[in-house]
Amino acid sequence: RLVVGCYVDDLFTLYADDGPNSLYADFTAALAERWNVEDEGPVSDLLNVDITRDADSILLRQENYIAQLVSTFLPNGIPASFHRNDAPAAEDLPKLVESAIADKDANKEPDAALKATYQSLVGALLYCSTQTRPDVSYAVGMLCRAMACPTQDMLQAAYRVLYYLSHHRAVGLRYVLRDSTPLA
């Protein structure tokens, strides 16, 4: 069996055998006949997801992506007032969302620069939550509800999620081989 993922002009293949008569060898030979291709070896990162493999597991993390977000959105770093054990969302987040939506319903338009920053940050946080960080999914889901009507308080709530991710950037998803039974 051969599994092929494609994003724009990058291919990612999963295979069990890469011997000379394997499906993988046939596939790469057929690609090379038509296009100029390069096998970059075992994947270590793909679409801002760091991939680490050992004998029986795969670990997916976004340490580098989170560091990049911190440098982009928090040029002065993380405030000392945020503690490592703080949750990604404050208890009042649902009320902040409700208030932001009420402001929109009252035809209060958010500042364009605030809206652009908020949408960019929350979109990046959404990528983290869907790829490797389900621990921030609740907070990010709540933040997404106010994409069209962010307030300064909502932006601070989004920064809080980024503070949390930065303090816990080494956290990821580990997939462990439990047995060698084929999936299909």
Image (tube, rainbow, N blue to C red):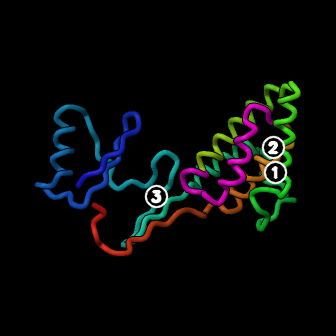
Question: Residue tagged by mark 3?
Answer: 51
Residue 40 inside the magenta-drawn segment: no
> Percent position (x, y) of residue 77?
78, 51
Residue at position x 77%, y 68% from top?
A: 85
Vertical position of residue 178 compared to residue 102: above or below: below
Q: Are marks 2 and 1 in contact (CB under 8 Å)?
A: yes
Q: Which mark is residue 97?
A: 2
Q: Is mark 3 on a helix, strand or loop?
A: strand
- Rounded to the nearest whole Å, what is the CA distance between mark 2 and mark 1? 6 Å
- Rounded to the nearest whole Å, what is the CA distance between mark 3 and mark 2? 35 Å
Residue type at mark 2 is Val
The secondary structure that most of the magenta stretch takes on is helix
Direction from residue 108 to residue 10 in the image, left or right? left
Q: Do the residues labelled 3 and 2 touch (CB within 8 Å)?
A: no
Query: Mark 1, residues whose alpha carbon is within 10 Å: few (<14), some, or many (≥20)?
Result: some
Residue at position x 57%, y 50% from top?
A: 130
Question: Residue tagged by mark 1?
Answer: 93
Looking at the picture, tell me which residue is in the foreground, 109 or 117.
Answer: 109
Q: Give the range drawn in magenta.
A: 129-150
Q: What element carries label 1?
A: helix
Q: State which quadrant residue 36 falls in.
A: top left
Residue type at mark 3 is Ile
Looking at the picture, tell me which residue is in the foreground, 181 or 78.
Answer: 181
> Percent position (x, y) of residue 65?
59, 49
> Percent position (x, y) of residue 183?
31, 63
Vertical position of residue 34 compared to residue 88: above or below: above
> Percent position (x, y) of residue 184?
27, 60
Direction from residue 155 to residue 2 in the image, left or right? left
Residue type at mark 1 is Leu
Vertical position of residue 152 compared to residue 88: above or below: above
